[in-house]
Image: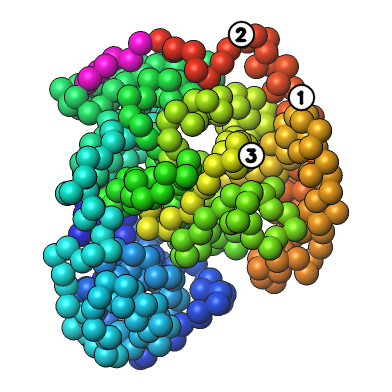
Amino acid sequence: MTMSEARALDAPRTLPPGPIATSEPARPLEGLRPPIRVVELELAGTIPDLLATTSPDGVPYRQALVLVRLHGEPLGLLSLDLPAGDLARAVWSRFHSQIARHLAADGEPPARPLSAAGLPPREAPPCVPERPFASRDVPLASVVVATCDRPFQLLRTLEDLLVQTYPRFELIVVDNRPGAGVTREAVTGRYGADPRVRYLPEPRVGLSTARNAGLAHARGALVAFTDDDVTIDRHWLSSLAQVFLDDPETACVTGLILPLELDTTAQLLFELFGGFSKGFQRRSFDLALNHPPDALFPYAAGRFGSGANSAFRTDVLRALGGFAVELGAGTPTRGGEDLDAHLNVLHAGHRLVYQPRALVWHPHHLDLPGLSRQIHRYGIGLSAALSKRLAGGRDERRAILRRLPAGLAYAVHPGSVKNRSKGPDYPARLTLLELAGMLRGPITYGLARRSAGARNPTHRSGARPPSGVGGGG
């Protein structure tokens, strides 16, 4: 178990048996009530039973959400009541076909029904993303982490990044509130002697501006972005990089984001809203052959992944202008910069790949006021990003307007995929807040565009920001 797994997840232990668990394959969150124990289970090894433990607030866990993995590959989520016995049987019932396909792709013999002994562990199965790296030169990867005065969370995330299995990488910490000095002190104090870590001050406010500063200083052929409060799987960077190395047409790769915890109602509601997860199947997107049968493609929010777990070919992202400084956190638009960047990649003729093996765990808001603000801001960011696209070329404007009726139905109709999946317990107030944010988006985009121009009318993402300091700076 990695340090991040030990910190973030209450790992299963061998426990006395309990009743047989049941799974919900189609909608794993249906019927769950917080607090919910979030557990990661690797099948190549012993499969324990699970008992009810207690949350940090002392409330007993009565249910669990289990991420099932084989050789590190996420197979899916399994929900069950606690205490649960014969976890192996529940896993086999839900995932036997995925297990069979995975073993066949690895050249392994078919598995028999799982027992508590699990599957035989292998030191380096063919599927692990690092396996090809031993026989080829790999490019340097730059990882950019933008932060604002959250040194405790930041240092934990950096610890996860420094134990990545990818052989060549650098970390660029962009301090978007450098005046306080706490981030600089934390980063240089702990990592000043580590040549892999660089500290970069960026006083101009905004997540896009901060990420563009990191992009401008990136030395790697690949540049990855994540947040300063996530827990990162140690194979994350290797899983992202492997896609680029295998497919020269891919310009952007996004990954899987799962909830770090589901201890409160607000955290569960965010997952019912849609969360960050885009499923457990690798998918490719472009505007040619890899075009899903979706009336909203490519303008549906979040279809491609999220900015907290994404990577680009550095030269491509620079050529596309980086992230739009009038979008994103720290601006009136509150978000939308990741969707805009993904659309830029596709419209430039490149391919985007969603790779669920690249996994991070995200801490959701604990309370309903924080969740309400977040969902309202998502509505603002989505329509602000679409407003930016509408203000662009005529062809794209026509493409968006053609999708407008389907988009409105998707957003407001109770029977749409988006709203039906929320379930009957999802508060109508949160849906109204999201819709209210969508109405504000075009106005906030105009304000943000004017503000960005007033701050620096010549600003371009490729401009060199102030010099970085710290290890390797």
Q: Residues within 10 Å of mark 2 (few under 14, many from 20)?
A: few
Task: Tell me the tag on residue 271.
Answer: none
Per the model, the C-alpha gap separating discs 2 and 1 is 18 Å
Percent across and percent down for residue 369 are 61, 46
Q: First in sequence: mark 1 or mark 3?
A: 3
Q: Which residues are magenta?
A: 467-473
In the picture of the structure, the residue carrying the numbered disc 1 is 446
Which residue appears at 49% of the width and 13% of the height?
A: 463
Q: Which residue is mark 3?
A: 347
Circles 2 and 1, Cβ within 8 Å, touching? The answer is no
Helix, strand or loop status at disc 3 = helix
Percent position (x, y) of residue 27?
A: 56, 74
- Residue on which the image places disc 2: 458
Image quarter hosting the C terminus:
top left
Query: Of 454 and 260, which appears nearest the observer?
Result: 454
> Label 3, label 2: how many angstroms apart (C-alpha)?
25 Å
Along the horizontal axis of the image, is 355 left or right of 120? right
In front here: 183 or 89? 89
Residue 211 % position (x, y) = 47, 27
Q: Amino acid at mark 3?
A: His
Q: Residue at x 67, y 27 (%)?
A: 332
Q: CA distance from mark 1 to mark 3?
A: 23 Å
Secondary structure of the residue carrying tag 1 is helix
Q: Is residue 442 above or below residue 60?
A: above
Q: Residues within 10 Å of mark 1 (few under 14, many from 20)?
A: some
Question: Which sits earlier in the primary sequence, circle 3 or circle 2?
Answer: 3
